[in-house]
Image (cartoon, rainbow, N blue to C red):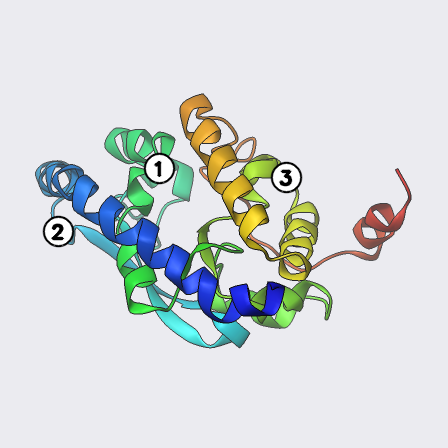
Amino acid sequence: MGTLYRRHGKRMLDLAIAVPVAVVTAPVVVGCAVAVVATMGRPVFFRQQRPGLHGQPFDIVKMRTMSDARDASGALLPDEVRLTALGHWMRRLSIDELPQLWNVLEGSMSVIGPRPLLMRYLDRYSPEQARRHDVKPGITGWAQVNGRNALSWEQKFAHDVWYVDHVSLLVDLSILARTARKLLDRTDISARGHATMPEFMGTTARAAATLAEPS
């Protein structure tokens, strides 16, 4: 049953969710697009190459939430400085994630799975952490409903690998229900002192040992 769901049922669930949600939320996306143009100018969408299934790159699409403000040398300012009030509001409500429904429809993402991170992280994962790419990345996932950006990188990756090993319809339905509650709570949006999360530089031996300790 688990293998059948992975091969066919999960895609059916993706389409059953993504199609109606994309239609219902289209006016919200259009309204936010107009607001982005009015406050930040173009482009409206943020596009970036991310690793997908088996680490293969794809272009993720999000609503733009940051300005292009730069310092005197021309370097982009830190994320927390460039995050606009509109962008903060969209992130609080997860509206910036809505364009990823198109990624789901085209098949590069799933509704549920590990969040797609940065291409440069690929060489920084341990072999165990790299297993998070054994399923398609998702808009929401097990790590998101168990702490999101309030977790350490190592904790998030442990949750991602747990999901890879336990993919099922019941798990996915549970994640969907818990995601709905998280959206209402609007918690765990960012790590302390950061607009989202600090950059992942690799797992230290100390962090790995701490995760291995029994609770």
Q: Earlier in the sequence, mark 1 or mark 2?
A: 2
Dot 3 or dot 2: first in sequence order is 2
Residue 21: image location, x then y, percent: 26, 45
The residue indicated by pointer 2 is 42
Q: Secondary structure at mark 2?
A: loop
Q: Quick one: 161 or 176, which is closer to the camera?
A: 176
Q: Badge 3, how many Cα within 10 Å: few under 14, some, many 20+?
A: some
Q: Is residue 6 above or below residue 112?
A: below
Which amino acid type is shown beneath numbered disc 2? Arg
Q: Quadrant of residue 39?
A: top left
- Amino acid type at circle 1 is Ser
Mark positioned earlier in the residue sequence (3 or 1): 1
Mark 1 lies on residue? 94
Q: Quadrant of the N terminus?
A: bottom right
Give the residue at the far front of this rendering: 1
Q: Is residue 182 left or right of residue 164?
A: left
The reply to whether residue 23 is visible in this rendering is: yes
**Residue at image coords 65%, 68%:** 130
Q: Quadrant of the C terminus?
A: top right
Comparing labels 3 and 1, the label whose residue is closer to the camera:
1
Crowd tier of the residue under label 1, counting other residues whose Cα lies within 10 Å: few below 14, some 14–19, many 20 or above: some
Which residue position holds label 3? Answer: 151
Q: Nearer the viewer, residue 106 or 122?
A: 106
